[in-house]
C-alpha cells in the first residue's frame, strides 16, 4: 500500500492540499517536489481520484488478508485496515494523515542525510508500546500460531507423528 493511497483514504483533501502539506518546509527543493508529484501521479494511474475510490481499492486488495466477513463492503474493510493497522495510537483520521506527512518528510530528510538516525534508547522511545499494545501483539502471535497449528497437527496425525505445541501459557512466564 503506497503512502498516498493511505493518505487519500484517510482524508477527503484535494491533491493540491495533500501536495501542499507534503512540501511544507521544502518549497525550494525541486527534487522533493517532483517526487511528491510522481507519487500523486502513481495514485491517479490506479484510478484512485476520490476518497471513496481509494477506500474501495484498498478494501478490495486487503479483504483476503484481513479475514473479514463476506458481508463487509470494500469500504468497511478499508476502514478496518486503517483503524486497526495504521497509526493505532492516533484516534482521528486527520491526525493519522498529518503523522504520515511528517513521517514522509522525515524519511526524505533521512535519505538525503539531512538528519541523523534516532537512538532507540532515547527517553522518547521508552513508552512507545503500552501494555495494551504488547498484549495485542501477543494475542496476534498466539492466533497465528493456532492458525498454523491446526493444519500441521492434522498432517502429523495422518502420518502418525505427534506434535504438541504449548499455546495455553505465554513463553515468558
Image (spheres, grey):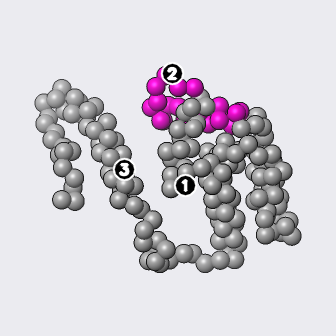
Q: Quadrant of the N terminus?
A: top right
Residue 89 magenta:
no
Residue placed at 34% from the left, 42% from the top?
144
Note whether 31 is above or below 160 in the view shown: below
Horizontal arrangement in the rendering, residue 92 relative to residue 33 (left or right) = left
Residue 74 placement (x, y as % from top left): 59, 29
- Counting every numbered tag in the picture gives 3
Q: Nearer the viewer, mark 1 or mark 2?
A: 1
Residue 123 placement (x, y as % from top left): 46, 77
Q: Which residue is mark 3?
A: 136
Q: Which residue is mark 1?
A: 90
Horizontal arrangement in the rendering, residue 119 relative to residue 103 (left or right) = left
Q: Which residue is mark 2?
A: 71
**Label 3 crowd (10 A; few <14 / some 14-19 / many >=20):** few
Residue placed at 46% from the left, 30% from the top?
68
Locate residue 112: give its quadrant: bottom right
Report, in whole angstroms, how far the alpha carbon at label 1 lies from the one at label 3: 16 Å
**Label 1 crowd (10 A; few <14 / some 14-19 / many >=20):** few
Span shown in magenta:
52-73
Note whether 53 is above or below 121 in the view shown: above
Amino acid at each position: 500500500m503506497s503512502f498516498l493511497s493511505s493518505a487519500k483514504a484517510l482524508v477527503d483533501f484535494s491533491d493540491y492540499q495533500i501536495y501542499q502539506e507534503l512540501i511544507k518546509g521544502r518549497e525550494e527543493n525541486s527534487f522533493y517536489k517532483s517526487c511528491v508529484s510522481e507519487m500523486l501521479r502513481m495514485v491517479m494511474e490506479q484510478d484512485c481520484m476520490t476518497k471513496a475510490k481509494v477506500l474501495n481499492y484498498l478494501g478490495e486488495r486487503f479483504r483476503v488478508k484481513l479475514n473479514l466477513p463476506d458481508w463487509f463492503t470494500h469500504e468497511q474493510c478499508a476502514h478496518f485496515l486503517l483503524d486497526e493497522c495504521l497509526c493505532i495510537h492516533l484516534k482521528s483520521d486527520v491526525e493519522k494523515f498529518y503523522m504520515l506527512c511528517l513521517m514522509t518528510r522525515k524519511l526524505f530528510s533521512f535519505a538525503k542525510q539531512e538528519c541523523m538516525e534516532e537512538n532507540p534508547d532515547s527517553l522518547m522511545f521508552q513508552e512507545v508500546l503500552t501494555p495494551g499494545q504488547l498484549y495485542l501483539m501477543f494475542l496476534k502471535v498466539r492466533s497465528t500460531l493456532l492458525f498454523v497449528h491446526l493444519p500441521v497437527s492434522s498432517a502429523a496425525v495422518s502420518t502418525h507423528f505427534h506434535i504438541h505445541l504449548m499455546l495455553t501459557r505465554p513463553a515468558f512466564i
